[in-house]
Amino acid sequence: MRLYEALEKKLNKKELELVPRAFDMVGSIAIFNEFPKELKKKEKLIAETLMQLNPYIKTVAKKTGKYTGKYRTPKIAIITGEKTKETLHKENSISLRLNVETCYFSTRTATERLRVAKQVKKGDKVLVMFSGVGPFPCVIAKNAQPSLVYGIEVNKEAHTFALENIKINKLENVVVQQGDVKKIMPKIKETFNKILLPLPKKAEDYLDLALAKLKPKGKIYLYMFVSEYDFGAVKKAYQRRFKKVNLVECGRYSPGVSRICLELTV
């Protein structure tokens, strides 16, 4: 990696081995996970070196804690560059404006968003629970031909960005609503061909709520974190309840634990 080559003359061997091996790029912001305490005095040097190698990076930041709170958002500290946590991110033919600290967003599920969009048929009605700044609704509306994409998000700031992102991408068939899905869902008169629950740690708690709004022969996309040793057991458990169950591994959460999507057909 070019970063390591550039740091070879700036750090000693032990320090070099401790440099994080990956970072997320959200728009023009590069975000590292927490640096080891041994690199505390070298963080700015590493960040500035990264910016020198990549002119498109305007800000380098780091996570200072895990995703926490009601909105599953991380604490972010800027190391160097522009003093902003707001950026414009591009993926799958869309643009998304967001604040990387106040809104939950993962670049690592971009491939999964497009995979799901390709399953949406012309005229389908799609519901995205926990829609955030609108990545799933916008990707689906841009890359498929649904008649309606409906999103629900409790985080007011994320919802405001979602409204902006719908306009940025010139999408006319996307509707988003701010509020608690438990309060909003019973009031929705529509039923849907496909319903997404992209909330891996708690999605199962909302499954019955989603099923109440699913059309006959419709499909649920249920996301969860599962040990790679439990794939078979999880799939078997849902096969008792659903006509067809397809398990798709769509990312790594931690060593031995994957992010999966259960495609559940009634």
Image (cartoon, rainbow, N blue to C red):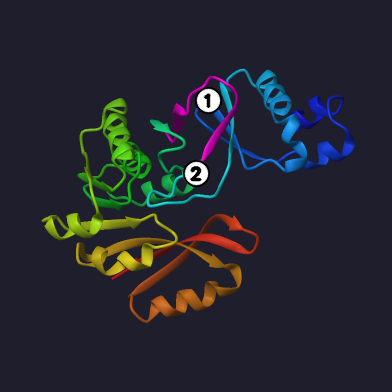
User: In this picture, is 6 found above or below 219?
Assistant: above
- Please identify the quadrant where the N terminus is shown: top right
Who's the residue at 45% across and 30% down the image?
A: 90
> x, y (%) of residue 149?
24, 45
> x, y (%) of residue 251?
55, 54
Mark 1 neighbour class, 10 Å CA radius: few under 14, some 14 to 19, many 20 or more: many
Q: Is residue 84 magenta?
A: yes
Q: In this orientation, which residue lies closer to the viewer: 12 or 190?
A: 12
Sequence order check: which comes first, mark 1 or mark 2?
Answer: 1
**Residue at numbered disc 1:** 28
> x, y (%) of residue 175?
21, 41
Numbered range of the magenta stretch: 74-93
For residue 213, side relative to residue 247 (left or right)? left
- Secondary structure of the residue carrying tag 2 is loop
The amino acid at mark 1 is: Ser
User: Is residue 260 visible in this depiction of the protein?
Assistant: yes
**Residue at numbered disc 2:** 74
For residue 172, side relative to residue 164 (left or right)? left
Count of marks overlaid on the render: 2
Who's the residue at 38% across and 40% down the image?
A: 135
Q: Is residue 217 magenta?
A: no
User: In this picture, is 264 found above or below 6?
Assistant: below
